[in-house]
């Protein structure tokens, strides 16, 4: 397994180092800053890569689905106890449950954003 980003960083570092050895085209502190920024960029990429490589905990996802289902069962009962009108109670229960299921669906999409499903981001690394 080769890390393509590290290979590209190595190429750029070698290119800048060779050019600096042949002729000083910029001041040494600026060359040092080039190397530091390349290293910082690679470190940031490796930090971001942890999100892709670390799977979302399956028990937590299943517990979230169960609690969403229980929320859909309990909230209408709670709203009916506090609201007098049946239309208002139905509307409030429907909107709150729909919003909660919408957030759960967004959560499900954010669990693994880098796969090849229709709604996912096409970001190859």
Image: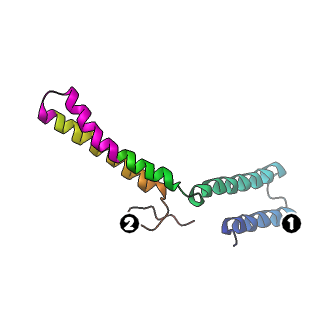
- The residue where tag 2 is placed is 118
Q: Nearer the viewer, residue 98 or 69?
A: 69
- Image coordinates of residue 100 in percent, x first then y, are 33, 43
Give whichever of 25, 73 is nearer the camera: 73
Left or right of residue 125, residue 46 in this image: right
Image quarter where the C terminus lies is bottom right
In front here: 19 or 103?
103
In the image: residue 28, left or right of residue 114? right
Per the image, is 82 magenta? yes
Rendered-image quadrant of the N terminus:
bottom right
Disc 2 residue crowd, few under 14, some 14–19, many 20+, Cα 10 Å: few
Q: Residue at x 37, y 52 (%)?
A: 105
- Toward the right, the furthest residue is 21
- Label 1: which residue? 22
- Residue 119 versus residue 92 in the image, above or below: below
In percent of width and height, residue 14 lies at 79, 66
Q: Which residues are magenta?
A: 69-88
Principal SS element in the magenta part? helix
**Residue name at image x 38 percent, y 49 percent:** 66
């Amino acid at each position: 397994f080769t890390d393509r980003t590290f290979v590209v960083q190595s190429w750029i570092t070698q290119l800048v180092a060779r050019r600096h050895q042949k002729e000083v085209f910029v001041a040494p502190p600026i060359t040092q800053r080039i190397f530091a920024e390349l290293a910082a960029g690679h470190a940031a990429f490796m930090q971001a890569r942890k999100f892709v490589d670390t799977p979302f905990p399956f028990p937590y996802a299943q517990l979230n689905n169960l609690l969403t289902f229980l929320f859909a069962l309990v909230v209408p009962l709670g709203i009916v106890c506090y609201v007098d009108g049946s239309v208002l109670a139905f509307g409030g229960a429907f909107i709150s449950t729909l919003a909660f299921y919408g957030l759960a669906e967004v959560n499900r999409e954010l669990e693994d954003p880098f796969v090849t499903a229709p709604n996912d981001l096409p970001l190859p690394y």
